[in-house]
Amino acid sequence: MARILVVDDERNVRTTVALALEREGFEVDCAESGEEAVDRVRDGAYDLVITDCRLRGISGMDVLDEVKRSAPETEVVMMTAFGTIEGAVEAMRRGAFHYLRKPFQSADVVEVARGAVEARAPASELDLRSGPERASAFEGIVGRSKPIRELLELVAKVADTDSTVLITGETGTGKELVGRAIHAASRRAGRVFCAVNSAAFPETLLESELFGHRRGAFTGASTHKKGLFEHAHQGTVFLDEVAEMPLSMQAKLLRFLQTGEIRPVGGETTRVVDVRLVTATNKELEKEVEAGRFREDLYYRLAVIPLQVPPLRERTEDIPLLVDHFLRRFSAKVGKSLAGIEPEAMEVLQSYSWPGNVRELENTIERGVALCRGPRITLEDIPARLRSRPAEASPQAIQSLQSLERAHILRTLDQVGWNRKRAAELLEISTTTLWRRLKEFGIDGDRAASGARARP
């Protein structure tokens, strides 16, 4: 039976937390001060200490430091009010397992406690029978590695500002999760969070999506529509793949950032909205500016606070935590009761370079859960391309593959008379992906369809 120490100088909080944990079978002690908590940790072995950040006398941070010094195997969970969220992230950096934001539900503390207790088990013995992922998590971001802790520190620092944030990182690293974390840790958390992919809309529709439109503004506009900026008033808008935005649309976005004013497509009046803008891209915007594809003035407006999300290959120690997280999710989804993953399979996952980052790992675990026929995911459930550990392709090989892809797309378009919808069906991709590929290859589809197409 796991032993837990609950530390809070408010009796009601101590009692509520202790009762919730005891009902779940935990052995619980309580301390009303930091000094008492330190004495109890020195005298007895605890699996978990749950302490408030702010205590009279010795603070919760002091309790954390003493636990990590005298009983490093004991996990610590911090309880924090909204105004001390930055301190909670600092505690995570110093070794805390997780934090609970007050007020919280009894179910929340029980789940976090289970996860913290299970975290003491070796990563190769992951157990999916109960509890949440074994990871420090900040609004869905799973990881305890140094790069992730440094990222979370920055998120906590910038969350309560209104400055625009530019999140960069490779595809699949979790840029939208970071955007959501910024919103969730800010004073706008109770308001709307809207996410939109700039590459998913043609220019006219993107303008309508962001600024709204009036009835009759264009073909198909049969009613008035409120744009995302108006919908998210006093909230946050996350604009993904911002590098794909056409130059004319960039000018309109720049004006919005300068004035805060929106004017629906086809409208004659403007209104001011209060929106925090967070953008993301997997491209180097500085190079896009140099190439004339992105406005320099807009770049500086967006990159007031730049955040870089590390690729998975730079945080491999987080892989067991991420695997556990995805195993739980997909096991529950398909109704399986898996006991974990075999050490040999975990070794393969930790040695792979993950060019697709966390998204690729997520897809791999979903596949493994679907194929698994035993109590644990085995080496045979892992894709062969991961098991063979092929060497990374050279830049020349990548260029060659891109040339082949370009030629194949052009041949397919020729076959269907440049009907993009039909071509996308034959290529087994979406029309949005086809449009993006044409743009990446520098092919103007309208000119190409009329005979001015560049040949491979």
Image: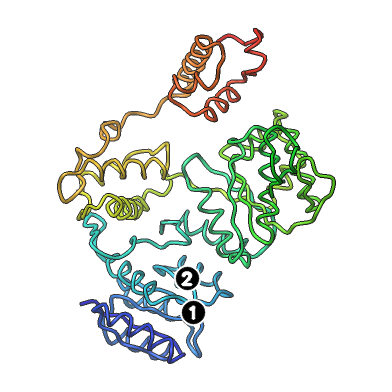
Which percent across, then down, holds residue 190? Answer: 59, 66
Query: Closer to the camera: disc 1 or disc 2?
Result: 1
Q: Residue furthest left?
A: 374
Depth check, front residue: 211 or 164: 211
Q: Position of residue 372 (x, y in %)?
A: 20, 43
Q: Secondary structure at mark 1?
A: loop
- x%, y% of residue 437? 55, 25
Whether tag 1 and tag 2 are in contact, CB under 8 A, the answer is yes
- 189 on left or right of 33: right
Q: Badge 1: how crowded within 10 Å, few (<14), some, or many (20+)?
A: many
User: Which quarter of the rendering shows the C terminus?
Assistant: top right
Check the image and report above or below for 123 versus 387: below
Distance of label 1 from label 2 (alpha carbons)? 9 Å
Q: Residues within 10 Å of mark 2 (few under 14, many from 20)?
A: many
Amino acid type of the residue that numbered disc 1 sits on in the rendered structure: Cys
> Is 276 placed left or right of 403 in the picture?
right
Residue 164 position within the rendered picture, expressed as x and y whole percent measured from the top left: 68, 53
* Residue sitting nearer the eye, 328 or 268: 268
Residue 220, picture quadrant: top right
Q: Nearer the viewer, residue 98 or 247?
A: 247
Residue 189 found in image quarter: bottom right
Q: Residue at x 37, y 77 (%)?
A: 67
Tag 2: amino acid: Ala
On residue 247, which mark appears? none
Q: Which residue is mark 2?
A: 91
**Which residue in the protein does label 1 denote?**
53
Quarter of the figure with the N terminus:
bottom left
Q: Give the residue displayed 80% in from the left and 54% down from the top.
A: 271
